[in-house]
Amino acid sequence: MSDVSPLLRGSRLAIAERIAGQLRSGSGGGSLVLADIGMGKTMVAQGVRDLLDGRLPISTVLATSSLSTVPFGALGPYLSGLSARDVDSPVAVMRQLNARFHPDDAGNVPVLVLDDAQFVDESSAALIAQLVAGGQLRLVALGRRSAELPADLLQLTIDGLIDQIDLDPMAEQEIQQLCETVLAGPVLHSVGGYLARASEGNPMMAQALIEGAVRTHSLVRRRGVWILVGEFPSADLPLTEVIKRELVGRPPAERRALELVSLADPLPLSVAERLGHREAIARLEAARIVTVSQDEAPVVRPSHPLYGDLVRALVPRGRSLLIRQQLVEQMDFDPYSFDGLLHHVAWSLDCGIRVPDQHLLKAARLANQVYNPDFALRAATVVTAPELVGAAQVEIARATFLRGNTARAVEIAQSLATTSVDPVVVSAAVIQMAQIHLQTLGLSTPLRADARLWRSALERIEADRVLDDFERTVMRHASIGTELIETGALLLESRFDGLEERLRTILASPDQNLTCRIVALTQLGEVLAWTGRPRSGVECTQEAFALMTQASTLTGFHEYVLTRHVIACIHVPRWDDVRAMLQGYSDRGPANLIFFGGAVGFVRGMIAVLTGDVDGGLGHLLPAVEALRESDVENCLPLALGVTAFAASLRGDAALVERCREDFEWLPARTDDPKYQMATAFMGLASVRTAGPDAALDAVEEVARASARSGAVTLELDVRLFGAFLGPPRDPQRILDLTAGLEGDGAAMLRRYARALLDGDAEGLAGTADAAVALGYAQIALHARRAAVPLLEADGNQARARELQRLITTAAGALGVDGAAADGGPRLDRLTRREREIVEHLLAGRTNRQIATAVGVSVRTVENHLYRVYPKLGVTRRDELVALRGPATTP
């Protein structure tokens, strides 16, 4: 079989295989494949050709719109032998086609691939349908889903002679695979997620976006993996030529309506109708080029953002200005509503039309929220109203930071904080500085300096001028803000004593505003999560998230709240909640993934590793680590390196473990940061291959003791839980003392584990394993069951021991580790000398007869020995005993 295109994957490959299989077997007359532009119809057809690999004769007809009204125009390439008079004769044309299309001597029926079937003239369609119905031809027709197809072709599907197949958009995982195929290497998973949404599952659009991003260096390769460092280009793509033919080829009335919709996006339907575009809009909607919302006041938008980008790029500036003037004359809506704000401001600036300063400022703020710093600068720098210039400078500082010039951003914000007499501007400037310091340095000293600067500025303002009631309210909010920066500094130092009471006092204060409440709830959630109350912490961070939806003007807080909510959920653990939060964040918009995509990929990878999917976890972690080197706003890189090293050790990749270790040692030591201490513990676990389990657990124990001194009891619990991935906890009494009164299912499971170990309770260990499985901790369950087996055997409960051993073997296979005891092989010490000798021969690959000859006994004697050996080792068959040996692996 000929190789199919590497781009043909997933559902498209399955469809191509289905069509090719039917054509080979002779079942049915073929298929009609319907899809929108770029959905992969041609790719599927080529896949069918490749899969058939010359076994059937294949011909092609490419129908065109220019010949759609010419009788037999589509079949012209096959009618070259006809005279000018005969070319219009259906009988003569059919005679020519009969000579061309018929089964060969082996009975193979030829295949016709008919592309752009919506353009086939009725005469050609009728003859093709007759050939298919008569069994002389099989058909693979490709058509536009929204277009009107010839009746004779549709009748073939109605009569059941050919199948109708609708190509649906590619799923996110398929787009991810497409990325990795096009780029020939691993890709940060958030890139695939973004492309799936940006392209709406359209493979041709996704591929064009990928190629455009590589060309503009928005997608770059780092250590062999592809990460996103800039925005994807939009209109300047090779794909434009394909879509241009579709859009520009529309009738003039539809083109004019499409220009209006694309430039106004969104356009109220009522305005479009007043401008005389009702029928054109209806036709564009039927062709799936525009969509009309179902709201009370419906609006019209391009059905795909790329359509709008392309049309806007094609409209000359003079015509754009004329359309804008026509629109303003009919305007009965707010062009600066949240939905269309950025677009309308950009359109006005492009046309040289003055935009009110308050709208410019609002647009700049929104652009920063959606991580579009270039547009934020464009809007904010043309604000001239004296009362708004300070606020515009704050947005300029934010945009400057997002563009990578941290020093200049801090300089702008600091200048505002020290010179402005507006308490609102001063507060926004200091908050901006604190966010920058938190995201770039993550140190307490700069935060304390920010708090002192804010307090000093407030004192200066109060001394220099008389404040009105609104300004006094702002000053009270700012006072709480300075305290929250100071509590944030204490959190960076893991100094939790007294923080809960301090934060609860702030939350009870009547002087707090929405921003203060969100930050206070988030910080309280962080305190509770690290001090043994992760469930309570999750409640706080969830409330903070709910309030975020009410605060559409907040900039830079979403990631702050998200990170702490995710950490609290992991402590419980609540894996599904974390996955849902990450998906929701990814869905907010593509640009945020430039700055936070590495952190999203890291958390997904960490969850996968902890819940037993080590290979899947590495697939997320390797690109995430490289993305975090570019942008690490929450200081996740150390922990990402630790988890990656641990996952690599589970897979025996010593080179990757060493690379992670070297990178980790180059990072500044942050022993006061719980995430850094967790990273150190994972690095200790990763040494199991080189140093052995005892040394690895010694390293974990050292981190656990250090964390106990910090007061972060959840950190110690997590570290001891991670240690249980290598074997039963070393200090069960400490775990009992530690977990008394702690919240979370993880704490309850570990407490049960410790109690069972201290009591020598085999069923308690088995129950611990069940609880661990329910939480996703398959590795911990494996070791708990291993610990239970010898206890059961000592009690004479061989049946239960064998039952657990079977579970161990199954789980080990699923995890890809050794199913035997922690020493890496079957427990031969349980056997007699003769039994050990026989088992060693068996593990060497010898048959029973060969073993009998080597040992000097009969074959029956060997079989009797093995009959007694199997239950001792917890297996029932020879292959299970061989599987116990496995590779010399320590999970």
Image (cartoon, helix red, strand yellow):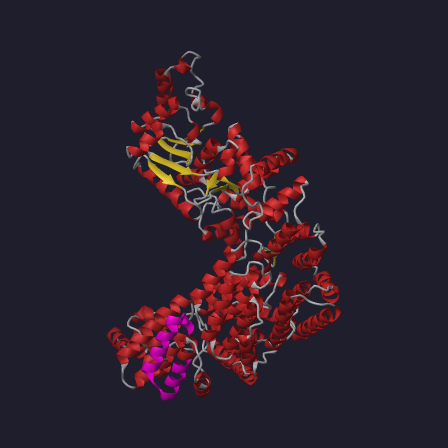
The residue sitting at 51% across, 46% down in the picture is 199
The residue sitting at 41% across, 70% down in the picture is 776
Q: Picture coordinates of residue 436 (x, y %)? A: 66, 65
Image position of 284 (left or right of 15) = right
The residue sitting at 42% across, 30% down in the picture is 118
Image position of 24 (left or right of 517) = left
Question: Camera-side residue: 528 or 452?
Answer: 452
Location of the C terminus by quadrant is: bottom left
Name the outermost residue toward the top: 85
Question: Camera-side residue: 1 or 258?
Answer: 258
Q: How many numbered circles does the render carry?
A: 0
Q: Which residues are magenta?
A: 750-779
68 vs 845: above or below: above
The residue sitting at 39% across, 66% down in the picture is 814
Q: Picture coordinates of residue 828 (x, y %)? A: 37, 80
Q: Picture coordinates of residue 675 (x, y %)? A: 56, 73
Q: Is residue 608 magenta?
A: no
